[in-house]
Amino acid sequence: MNALDYLQFVLAPQVVNGLALGVAVVLVALGLTIIFGLLDVINMSHGEFYAVGAYLALALGAAHIDFWLLIVLVPVLMLPLGMVTERLLIRPVFNTKDRHVTTLLVTFGLALIAEDVLKLIFGPNTQRPPTPIPGASEIFGIILPNYRLFLIAIGAVIVAGVAFVVYRTRLGAMVRAAAYDRNMAASLGVPVSLVYSGTFAFGVALAGLAGVLLAPIYSIFPTMGRDFILLAFTVVIVGGMGSIWGAVVAGLLLTQVQALASLVISPVWTDPIVFGTMVAFLVFRPQGLFGRLGHA
Amino acid sequence: MSRPVLEVSDLSIAFGGLRAVDQVTFAAERHRITTVIGPNGAGKSTLFNMISGALKPLSGTVLIDGVDMTGAAPERLKGAGLSRSFQITNLFFELTVAENLRLAAQVLEPAKRALLPIRCSTRAQAKTQAMLERFELTHKRDELAGNLSHGDQRRLEIAVCLASEPKILLLDEPTQGMSHQDTADTAKLVRSLTQDVSVLLIEHDIGLVMELSDHVVVMHQGRKLAEGPPAAVRADPQVQAAYFGHA
Amino acid sequence: MLDRLTLSMRASHVLAALLVVAALVLAVVGSAIGDTFYLRLATEALIFAGLALSVDLLLGYSGALSLGQALYFGIGAYTSALVLMKVPSFWLAMGAAAGMTFVCAIIGGLIANRVRGVYFALITFGLAQVVAKVVYNIRDLGASDGMIGIPVIDIGIGPFSVSAGNPVGFFLVVLVIIMALYAATAYLLDTPFGRVLTALKANEKRVPFLGYSVWRARMVCYLAAALIAGLSGALYPMLRGFVSPELMFFMTSGNAVISVILGGVGTLVGALYGSVFLVIIKSVIGSWTDHYLIIIGLLFMAGVLFMPKGLIGFVRPHVERMIAPRHLRETRAPEQDAPLKAEEVKP
C-alpha cells in the first residue's frame, strides 16, 4: 500500500471516526464539566441521564415524533428532571463537610436506580433507532456516513451555543460569578440557589441531548451510560474543571490519540495511554489545560 | 549566653510581583517572648508561614537551634522542635480534647511504638494528662473539641502545640476573638510558658504586646522596620509613623 | 485510660463477635441439614466483606474514597488462580496474592496518592477500569471469559486438612481469615499510626504540623487496604473455581462501597454486616424480581443522606453504653456527631 492509499483508506477514516467519537465524548463531557465546575459535584449519574435522553427519544420516536423535534423536546423534558435531582439530592448535603464525597455517592446511588428503572421499563435488550440521515458522502475519495458528518457539525453548533451562553451572556456571567465565589455572588444579587439548580438542570439537559444524538450510532441499552463515563471524566480533568474549551480540546485530542494509537499498537493498550494522560495531568497540571470555570 | 533558638536571616518571598516579605532578619532568644507586630498586610503571617514550613521562602535562611531548616516540610520542622498555632482555630473538631492532645504528644514516643496499641504509649498518655491539668481541661477531656467554647478551643490549641515539647512555639494571635478576661488569662498563660519554651508571637493587642514581650520586631510593608525591647520600640518615631499614620 | 475511640472499637468487637456466633450457628445448622447453597452464598458474602473492609479502612479512617478497590481484589484472585493451576497450595496462593497485590499497590499508591478527595476517587476508578479492560483482552488470562477449571484444593492447617470443596469446612476457613483481617485492621487503628489516620480524616491540613507525614500515612493505609482486598480476592477462585474480569469491574468496587455505606462508614464491623446484608437483600428481593438494584439504590441513597453511620449507627451506641466505664457514660457518643460546620469547608 502506498502512502496516499494509506492516507485515504486507513488514516483519514480513522481520523474522522475519531472525530465523531470525540464529538460524542465532548457532548457528554460538556454537561459534566459545567456541573463539576460550578457545583463541584462529580455527577456519577451523568451517564444515566445520557441514557434517559436516549430512551426518551426512543419512546417519543415510537410515538411518531420527528427526530428534529426530539432534538429540542428531549432536553426540555430533561430540565425538570435535573432541577428535581438537584433540589432533592444535592441541595440537602451541599453545606456539609464531606460534600464532595457525599454528592458523588448520592449520584452513584441515583445511577443504580436509573439504570434499573430503564431496564424495568424498556427491557434489557439493545435497541437501535433508525439513522435519521441515511446514506454516505464521498469527500476527497473518503466515504463517510452522513449522520456522522451531521453529528460533527451539530456538535460544533452546540459547543458554540453553550460557550456563547456561558461566556457572553448575563446569565453566563452569573454562573461564572457563582463558580468563582458563591458568597460574593450572592451578596451582589445573583440568585445563587436558582443558578445552582438551573446549571445542574442545564448539564442534565445536555446529557439528554447527547443521548438523542448519539443513540443512532452507539445504540440504546440500559447500561449505555457506563461506556462513556470514564472517558468523559478523563476529558473533564484534562480539560480543566468546568472549562468548556478545555473539554472540547481534551475531548477531541484524547479521542484522536486513541484512534491513531490503535493503528500502531493493539487497541487494548489505547485505554491505558488515555488514562496515563489523565494521570499525568493530575500530577503535573491539576488545574487542567484551561483552568477551572470562573477562575480563568 | 547561648545561641538563639531561632535565627531568621534575609528571609524573602514574593507573590506575583509583590514582595510580601523582604529580607527580614531577627533572632528569638531562649525562654523569651519575641513578638512580631505590624499593621495588617505587613507580612507577619506570611513570615510565620515560612518559618513553620507552610510556605517555601524565595531566599534567606531559617536556623532552629543552629540547624538550617529553611523550606523544610512542617513534619520535619516539628522534629527539629518547632510547633505552631493558627490564627483560625485549627483542631481536630471531631475528636475529643484528650485525643487532640494525645495525637500531638504521640511524637514523643519512640518510633518503634507506632505499631503497638496506644495503651503502650505511656509517655504520650502521661503528657496528655499533664497538659489537661495544666490547661484546666481535665473535666472536658472526653468532650469533642468542636463542642468547646471559643476560649477553651484557643487554650486547647496552645496546649496541643505544647504537648510535643517543642523548643520554640509560634503563636499566631492566640487571643484572637477572646473576651477581656480570657485575654488576660491567656497572657498569664503565655508568660508561664517561657519556663519550658521560647515563644514567637504575632499579636494585635498592643497593650498585651508591651506587657508580655521581651523583644519586639516591627514589620511594615514586608520589611523589618525596627526591633528592640518594647519600650524602645514604642518610642521609635518610625514605628509611630507606621502605626499611627503621622509622619 | 479508656478513651472514646477505643470504646467505639470495642463496641464494634462485640458486634463482630455476634457475627461470628451467627456464622457458627449457620455452619452447624448448614452441616446438619446438608446444605450447600446457603453456605456457599455465606462464604461469598464473607469474601466480599473482606473487600468492603478494605474500602472502609480507606474511607472510614483516612477519609479517602476508593472507587476501584476491586482492582486489588481482582489482582489477588487472578494471582491465586494462576498459582493454584500450577501448584495446589493454599498458603502459596495466599502468599503470592499478598506479594503481587503489595507490589501493584505500591505502583497504584504512588499514582493515586498524588491527589485527594474526588480526584482520588476518580483516579482509583480509572485505574481499576483500565486494568480490568487490559485483563479483559489478554488471552493468557482467559480474556473476557476469565479462567475456569481451578482445581479444588486441600487446605492444610497444622495436622488438619480441609477441602475447599467442603461447604462447611471452607466456610469456616474463610470466616477465620476474614475475621483475622478484621482483627488486624482493628489492631492497626488502635495504634499511634492508626490514630494519625483518624486525624487525617478529621483535619488533614493540621496533621503535618503535629509532626506526621501525610503522604506516608496515606500510603501505608493504601497498602494495608490493598493487601486486605488482595487476600480476600485470593479466596474467591478457591470457592468458585473460576475468576473473570468482572471481579475488577466497577460494579464489584461499587458493591463494596454500598456495603460500607449501608453497614456504617468508619465502624469496620459495619463493612462486614453491610456485605452480609447486601447479599441477603439481593437474594431475598432477587427471588421475586430482577430489579433489586432499585431497592439497593434507594437504601444506599437513604444511607448516604440520613444515616451517616449506617446500620451499625443504630446499634453501636447501645452497645457502647453497655460496656462503657462510668466516666464515659454521661458524655455524648461520637455517633451523634457534632453538627458538621459549613465553615469548615473553607480552603
Image (tube, rainbow, N blue to C red):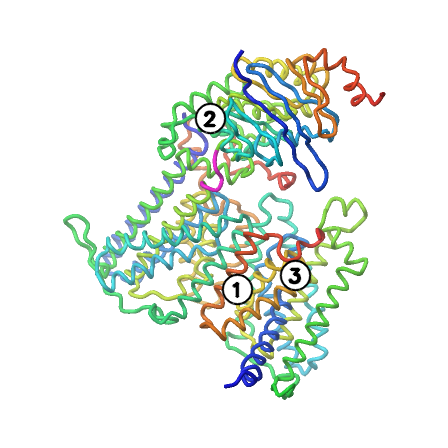
The magenta-colored residue range is: C212-216
On the question of residue C125 being in view, the answer is: yes
State left or right for residue A67 relative to residue C55.
right
Residue B105: which disc?
Answer: 2
* Amino acid identity at mark 3: Gly
Residue C47 appears at what percent x and percent y? 35, 55
Q: Chain of mark 3?
A: A
Q: Amino acid at mark 1?
A: Val
Given this view, does label 1 or label 2 mark the residue nearer the observer? 1
Measured as percent of width and height from the top left, residue A283 is found at 54, 52
Disc 3 packing (10 Å; few <14; some 14–19; many ≥20): many
Q: Are marks 2 and 3 on the same chain?
A: no
The answer to whether residue B9 is magenta is no
Label 2 packing within 10 angstroms: few (<14), some (14-19), many (20+) = many
Q: Chain of mark 1?
A: A
Mark 1: few/some/many CA within 10 Å (<14, 14-19, 20+): many
Decide: marks 1, 2 in contact (CB < 8 A)? no
Q: Secondary structure at mark 3?
A: helix
Residue at disc 2, secondary structure: helix
Identify residue for label 1.
A274
Q: Residue at the spot x=70%, y=42% of the render?
A: B16
Residue type, label 2: Ala
Q: Position of residue C165 (x, y in %)?
A: 23, 61
